[in-house]
Amino acid sequence: SHILEATGLKKYYGSEPNVTKALNGVDLSIEQGEFVSIIGTSGSGKSTLLHMLGGLDVPTSGSVVIRGKEIAKMNDEQLSVFRRRNIGFIFQNYNLVPILNVYQNIVLPIELDGGKIDQEYIDNIVRLLHLEEKLSNLPNNLSGGQQQRVAIARALASKPAIILADEPTGNLDSKTSLEVMQLLKLTMAEFNQTLVMITHNPEIAQVADRMIRIEDGKIINTDRER
Ligand code: ADP
Ligand code: ADP
């Protein structure tokens, strides 16, 4: 069974006569543990798709089903709880809290949610992402690559089944980007998590199990490599 399923997904912005068809009928099924990259030119609908998949915005028509639940059927409160429990987001700007050290940043979402910190799991993530030596540093004392890894650790910390990432290595040089992606892939595989990632970079997209190309709001090819 699929952990994430989009069917006939459409998203139109604006109203007649100025309608932008950002998504124009997307069908997509993603298995648990799968790593999918989404590529396509600017304006092709990648971010819109990721927002729909994460329940950050409502589709014009079609459905998104996550772990058997149709997210359009939830009210705002149910949706935000569901999102916190199931989905981690990684965006291009790291959004680290400057006055908290690395460890505090990583566990912040768990603490805000009143959750229990699984220390062994956090230690594992920290080790995989090579952040052991940096836990007491403030974000400003880290390189871009290190800050990016902290943002990844934070997204993983609450053990979301699904991670949605929008250009997660967008601010890094290509060598560091590849390293971060390999680490992320390793971490996700270790915990059988699902990753859907937007990228402009074909080299980064290749790290995924499957690459989806989107053009004018439609998936134009999907290429399975395993
Ligand atoms: P990508 O992420 O591939 O660059 P987007 O999903 O951001 O593409 O955008 C797809 C299309 O929808 C573009 O034409 C964009 O201008 C338009 N669009 C995106 N967000 C909005 C919005 N909030 N309001 C109006 N148009 C939007
Ligand atoms: P990463 O591997 O996470 O990208 P590195 O430690 O390799 O981080 O940093 C990349 C480059 O940036 C190195 O030349 C390093 O000396 C430099 N660097 C690291 N931290 C900082 C910082 N806080 N400010 C400026 N430059 C830094």
Image: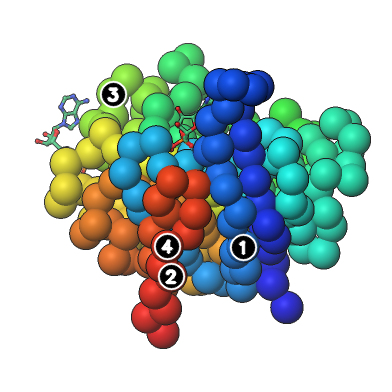
CA distance separating discs 4 and 3:
43 Å
Q: Which residue is mark 4?
A: 220
Considering only order in the chain, which callout, 3 or 4, is on the residue closer to the N terminus?
A: 3
Residue that appears at 40% across and 51% down: 215
**Front position among marks 1 and 3:** 1
SS label for mark 4:
strand
Secondary structure state at the residue bearing disc 1: strand
Report the side of 202 relative to 83 (left or right). left
Q: Is residue 18 above or below residue 82?
A: above
Instruction: Give x and y (percent) for residue 55.
Output: 70, 41
State the SS at label 2.
strand
Residue nearest the observer in this picture, 201 or 127: 201
Residue at the image position 44 percent from the left and 17 percent from the top: 98
Residue 141 — which label?
3
Residue 128 percent location from the top left of the image:
40, 59
* Circle 1 residue: 27
Which residue occupies the foreground of this view, 222 or 109? 222
Q: How is the image coloured?
A: rainbow
- Tell me which label, 1 or 3, sits earlier in the chain: 1
Mark 4 vs 1, N-terminal side: 1
Residue 29 is drawn in which quadrant?
Answer: bottom right
Residue located 76% across and 53% down the image = 63
Q: Are marks 3 and 2 in contact (CB under 8 Å)?
A: no
